[in-house]
Image: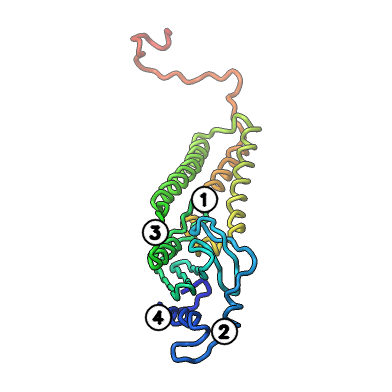
């Protein structure tokens, strides 16, 4: 499936590209679009930005096509992605060649350093078809190693905060520094708000859960742990402090003294 969820096959896509290379005629000679109309479809228009898979190479947008990119100004192409599949269509009229690639995987983690590896696979297939050298792709393992370390560190720190808040409540401790306690509670609430709002910058929680469920799980866990910690800290802050009455005498346990003397004599 492509980004528009149009189900197709490599054979069908190959026939579609062949129609472009035949000036708008299908394999059986049926004209699908006029030659002039076809040239209009692939005429470059305004500048377009490509994803990290293209290493920021320049491109222009035509009518449903990009022109240029990593294969030079004579390339006409369009990538497409869904959460679990990827596609790339490329036309090279000067070489009378078209390439369609389909990958049964998708990778859309919206974090810095994402190599967009599935699109890079398609890019490298096209390089190979053209007889060009295949550029080395960044490591997906390295990306996820960094992502996992940062995620586990943040979740671990949030879990430690919850554990400390639970311990303080169990021991009956009240906040020793009320001002700092209030600041910590407000900081936790602000963190929860930021985590809940952040996905809206990426299309909302539904989009993040669909395209990057690993990131959605991390954000959700952090928001939950921070919310629990803030709630427990609020309970601790509101707990009245208990002070020992003036003049109270502590209970002295009877029995042998560690020093070998009677506690009453001591």
Spatial separation of the CA atoms under disc 4 and disc 2: 23 Å
Mark 2 element type: helix
> Dot 3, crowdedness within 10 Å: few (<14), some or many (≥20)?
some
Q: Residue at the spot x=63%, y=46% of the render? A: 190
Q: CA distance from mark 4 to mark 3?
A: 24 Å
In primary-sequence order, the first of circles 4 and 3 is 4
Structural crowding at the residue carrying mark 2, measured as other residues with C-alpha within 10 Å and reported as few (<14), some (14–19) or many (≥20): some
Report the residue marked by disc 3: 134
Q: Position of residue 201 (x, y in %)?
A: 61, 57
Between the residue at mark 3 and the residue at mark 1, the CA separation in whole angstroms equals 23 Å
Q: Nearer the viewer, residue 183 or 49?
A: 49
Front: mark 4 or 3: 3
- Judge whether 7 appears above or below 228 on screen: below
Of 46 and 254, nearer the camera is: 46
| CB-based contact (under 8 Å), mark 4 and mark 2 | no
**Total marks in image:** 4
Q: Nearer the viewer, mark 2 or mark 1?
A: 2
Name the residue nearer the viewer: 108 or 172.
108
* Label 4 sits on residue: 11
Q: Is residue 257 left or right of residue 58?
A: left
Q: CA distance from mark 4 to mark 1?
A: 36 Å
Q: Which mark, by number, is residue 112?
A: 1
Left or right, residue 220 beside residue 190: left
């Amino acid at each position: 499936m492509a980004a528009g969820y149009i189900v197709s096959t490599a054979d069908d896509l190959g026939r579609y590209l062949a129609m472009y290379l035949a000036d708008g005629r299908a394999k059986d000679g049926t004209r699908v679009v006029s030659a002039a109309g076809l040239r209009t479809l692939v005429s470059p228009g305004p500048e377009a930005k490509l994803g990290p898979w293209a290493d920021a190479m320049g491109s222009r947008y035509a009518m449903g096509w990009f022109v240029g990119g990593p294969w030079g100004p004579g390339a006409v192409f369009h990538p497409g992605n869904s959460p679990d599949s990827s596609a790339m269509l490329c036309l090279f009229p000067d070489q009378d060649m078209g390439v369609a690639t389909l990958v049964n995987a998708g990778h859309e983690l919206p974090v810095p350093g994402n190599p967009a590896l599935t699109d890079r696979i398609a890019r490298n297939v096209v390089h190979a078809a053209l007889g060009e050298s295949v550029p080395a792709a960044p490591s997906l393992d390295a990306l996820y190693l960094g992502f996992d370390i940062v995620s586990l560190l943040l979740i671990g720190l949030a879990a430690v905060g919850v554990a400390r808040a639970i311990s303080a409540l169990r021991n009956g401790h009240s906040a020793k520094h009320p001002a700092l306690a209030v600041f910590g509670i407000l900081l936790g609430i602000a963190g929860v708000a930021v985590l809940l709002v952040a996905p809206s910058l990426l299309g909302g929680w539904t989009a993040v859960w669909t395209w990057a469920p690993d990131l959605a799980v991390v954000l959700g866990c952090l928001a939950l742990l921070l919310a629990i910690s803030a709630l427990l800290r609020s309970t601790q802050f509101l707990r009245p402090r208990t002070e020992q009455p003036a003049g109270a005498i502590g209970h002295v346990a009877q029995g042998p003294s560690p020093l070998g003397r009677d506690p009453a004599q001591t």
